[in-house]
Image (cartoon, grey):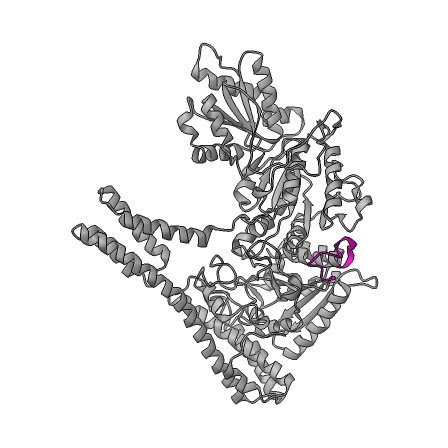
Amino acid sequence: MENLITDAGVDQFISGHEPYIREVLHDFWICCVSREASIMVRREVLTGKAKFGIGGSGKEVAQVAMARSFKKGDFRTGYYRDQTFMFAIGAADLESYFAQVYADSDHDRFSGGRQMASHFASPLIDDKGEFTNHKETFNVTADISSTAGQVARGIGVALASQKFREVPELADHPLNDQGEGISFFTIGDGSTSEGPFWEMMNAAAVMKVPMAVNVWDDGYAISVPKKYQTVKESISRALEGFLIDENKNGIRIYTAKAWDYPGLVEMYERAVSKIREEHIPALIHVMDMTQPLGHSTSGSHERYKSAERLDWERQNDCILKFGEWIIENELASQDELDKLKEEATKVVKKAKNAAWEKMTSRNRRDKESFTEVVREIYRSNGEPESIKEKYDKLGQIQFPKLSHIISVGRKISHDLALKNINHSKLTQWLQDKMAVLDEQISSNLYSDTAHSPLKIPEVKPTFTENSPVLNGYEILNQFFELSFERYPELFAFGEDIGKLGDVNQGFAGLQKKFGEHRIFDTGIREWTIVGQAIGMGMRGLKTIAEIQYLDYVIYALAPLSDDLATLRYRTDGMQMSAPIIRTRGHRLEGIWHSGSPMGMLLNSLKGMHLCVPRNMVQAAGMYNTLLQSDDPAIVIEVLNGYRIKERRPDNLGEFTVPLGQAETIREGTDLTVVSYGATLWIAMKAAEYLENYGISIEVIDVQTLMPFDTEGLIGQSVKKTNRVLFVDEDVPGGGTAYMLERTLSEQNIFEYLEIPPRTFSSREHRPAYGDDGDYTTKPNSEDVVMEVLNMLHQVNPEKYPVVI
């Protein structure tokens, strides 16, 4: 096992011992370093140098034991208590750890200053977006703060190992580790009460994936004891029904005490070797952990723990008992352990001070350059009190950062601008520094590599007189067949996608051709369907994950929003996963099969692309683009369009639809109607009707909502027609409001509008069942005709009537 610190001061204390004792003492040293780091983080927060601290005090011994079984090629999918493990495997150094505590964008190697303390990640892709060699590294998937949020990708990482071992088509994949890699999953005991944890455990057991599920049990979820969290007050006892049977169905369950170093090391070696060999998941329940520093820096655990509990925690501190075991077994003396603790304090303090100096020295340089610019303006304009008053406020900030300096600078700039005083140097300084801050904080939401979907070359569809006319589902079926032939690393899964071929037959017959190992059914578990896609994508596999209906995306919204959509951003471009989430929606029948919650998706999934094709040919073109790209996306097919006839392109497997490129479906001069998906055809029907009365309607299909009309086609149309109506079947204030806002703010259509723009969408309530329910709830062609005529009435009341 590789270790963190090669410090001469430490070596002199352990070098004289035999190898086994050196290893034990080094683990003790790592525990002491980690505990001291937690203590110092707390102090930094309390003294105002950092904003928040959270760590893994009380979990140290279990984590050094786990680290001994963690091999190169394995993946950690954990949470914000795992700093000791990170130190033990060498995936975190102390300066970077403190840099993250200080939100230092330049030196936080885990998130570029974007995540709070103890949220770790390791590079899984390089600067060009290419995957690194995961087989030769300790791999750490990026942490998130939401409780149990890591369960989704954890199972996907493990499933990738299964596929690498079992799928012949992956034999030549550069990341194929023959299934040796294990998903090491960690979670706090309180978070096992979350529904996704139980969904994940069931899915892992059913699929038989190599997953070590580690539960750190300190008896509390913040202030709430586990008697309110878990039946029988024990997650291992609660999961006894999952225990493996004689047919090897189920999971293995292991338990250990948090302070039992030799028992933990032995247990991990035994458990992990079984998982690695047999690909059967295991629960590892580490009990009797403590929280000597409480949950976080937001408060003291003395507020909710009894004196008896606090005393018990002091007596059963894992490092204390680890030291007692070392002495009892004559591996080292108390004096040697004390010297190790003293050296740990020195090393941590030195690293903390170095991290602080690196950050503050940059801030001092920024303040100095800012002061020079402001001083020149101040002196050349008679030393106005308003500048001095604003500048002096910087001195009231104990530890000013660049944002504080910029804030003061902008206030000074606003004052000078309103007084018509030239301050071009200050303006330039602010522009330069705001660009720096913008790059530090707001980059890498989407891919900017050569594989970005926005850089995939457009290949237009080709048609001949022999191009067949097929049902929409048949076009998709043929497209998916071509894709699975083209990409051996492509997988598809979801409810009813395997044997049935999906509920609308897009995958009909494909499981039989390509095998159950590549196209397969899942249980009704949207969280883990998405999780499978995220984790597999992080390991270089392409996936199409099916959510049967758009309404059901709500079940999967948390992992999509918290994990997948933020992955590239929260790692500052070090990790990515690019699955395609395939679903269908808009209108069919009833409350839960007619959803079109675009506003929910638009506001939750920044970092993903949102594709809304009008038909299955366009959907195929979007899939072709996305399968070549390195960004995640959700594709929403039109639910009632599968049996509509379409002409199949001759180059079905190659043609692409560029994301963000709107298309004019019908040209007109009197008014522009903007829509997508199912309502696009309603708009077309209305336009055709109005043409009979000499009214010329231009219809634009936006095709994708994220990105949105990057070439400004809507603005160009409005310049011509001077009127615009946005139509979809989301609720009011949803997708149509988004489209209107984008065109007003980005395409400046306001100056070209003769009358106010309008939006028309569904009613606020869910769509009722039956014909009357659909007609009353959703937009129809009569509604579009009504809106158009009523808008034109504002222009020429005599010519255009008001209708209902």
For residue 226, which quarter of the picture?
A: bottom right
Residue in the image at 66% along x and 40% along y: 623
For residue 624, above or below residue 105: above
- Which residue, as the protein is rendered here, is positioned at the far left? 382
- Identify the magenta region: 165-179
Residue 218 spot, x, y in % from top left: 58, 68
For residue 498, which quarter of the picture?
A: top right
Residue 537 spot, x, y in % from top left: 65, 52
For residue 255, above or below residue 485: below
For residue 525, above or below residue 236: above
Answer whether residue 250 is visible to the viewer in this image: yes
Q: Is residue 38 left or right of residue 46?
A: right
Answer whether residue 288 is visible to the viewer in this image: no
Magenta part, dominant SS: loop
Residue 333 spot, x, y in % from top left: 56, 89
| Residue placed most toward the observer, 249 or 460 | 460
Residue in the image at 68% along x and 32% along y: 617
Q: Tell how many labels.
A: 0
* Residue 460 drawn in magenta: no
For residue 414, above or below residue 474: below
Work out which quarter of the rendered image holds the N terminus and state it. Answer: bottom right
* Residue 167 drawn in magenta: yes
